[in-house]
Amino acid sequence: MKLASQTQSTDGHQIPVVERPWAEAEAPKASGADLPPYDRIKAMILSKAIPPDTKLNIDKLARELGVSQTPVREALQRLEGDKLVVGKKPRGLWTTPLLGERELRDLIEVRLLMEPWSARSAATDRATNPGREMLAEIERFVELGELKHQGYALASHDVAFHDMIFHAVGNTFLHDAFRQLHAHLHLFRLYPADLDGTHTIEEHKAIAEAISRADPQAAEEAMRAHLFAAMDRFSLGLRHDDTLSSLGTVRSQVLGPPPSATGAVSSHKETS
């Protein structure tokens, strides 16, 4: 596995670029020695070089990375905070499983509560809103060319793009709550149906343009549409027959039944 020498960093979320095919399944190899162990192990987990729900061998990781066990232990402790690693007493440390259908649905529901409102709030002042910077970030990603198909360029862009909105809103409690979701770290471990970012960029551009022209209603609607589209794309990574129908319940709860629907739409039952 080859790691680039830079990471995309946005307020504590760093996603190293991992130059490997998404579905490649060879064992992780030590490389990218200029990156700290935290970034290198995170890249292995995000790229599935270390598969989900796998026991971690600290001694083996240290030998593969060419470092002592101490920085590996420190890195794994940080990754526990990122919810990419979990301790299972007395069995040691494991990578966390992929999100299940219920977890994906819950995550999208929370984002639907936070992000459309944030996009609307960020679009209120034409002179100070982040629309121009968001469009520049989109252009930066587009100019990557073929590099868009490698590693986590799309994940890095997505982190930067959404973070600009929360930063512009200026509500530190809201921003911290979003960071604690670690949404991008978990969603991009699922198989996305938009590897080159074509659809994501179209949706991001609609959001950025609405914010840039200070159109709060359009910004809110574009963000909501983006989250629903992302929900459909990431749900493909779950590969359960009932996933789309269950996630469709989230859509109906927020938007209501489609115009052609007859009868009431039943709400899903929560289990304790």
Image: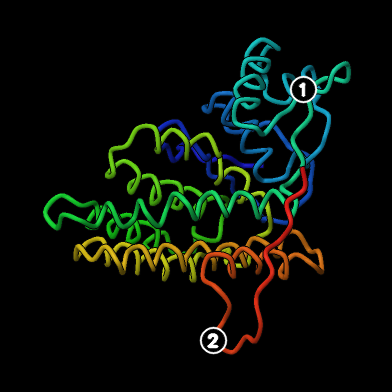
Quadrant of the image containing the C terminus? top right
**Label 2: how many Cα within 10 Å (few below 14, some 14–19, many 20+):** few
Q: Is mark 1 on a helix, strand or loop?
A: strand
Q: In which quarter of the image is the N terminus?
A: top right
Residue 138 in which image quadrant: bottom left
Q: Quadrant of residue 234?
A: bottom right
Q: Is residue 12 above or below residue 162?
A: above
Taking the spot 59% from the left edge, 70% from the top edge, the residue there is 252
Q: Which of 259 and 127 is in front in this view?
A: 259
Three-letter amino acid code of the residue under disc 1: Gly
The residue indicated by pointer 2 is: 259
Q: Position of residue 211 (x, y in %)?
A: 26, 61
Q: Quadrant of residue 79?
A: top right
Residue at horizontal 65 percent and vertical 31 percent from the top: 41
Residue 131 shown left or right of residue 222 in the figure? left
* Residue 157 drawn above or below residue 171: below
The span from disc 2 to disc 1 (Cα, nearest Å) is 48 Å
- x, y percent for residue 179: 48, 36
Residue 154 position, x and y percent, is 50, 55
At label 2, which amino acid type do we have?
Answer: Pro
Please indicate whether residue 37 sits to the left or right of residue 48 in the image.
Answer: left
13 vs 232, nearest the viewer? 232
Tell me the residue that label 1 is attached to: 87
Task: Give the mark nearest the N terminus, 2 or 1.
Answer: 1
Q: Is mark 2 on a helix, strand or loop?
A: loop
Mark 1 neighbour density, 10 Å: few (under 14) some (14–19) many (20 or more): some
**In the picture provided, is 120 more to the left or to the right than 79?**
left
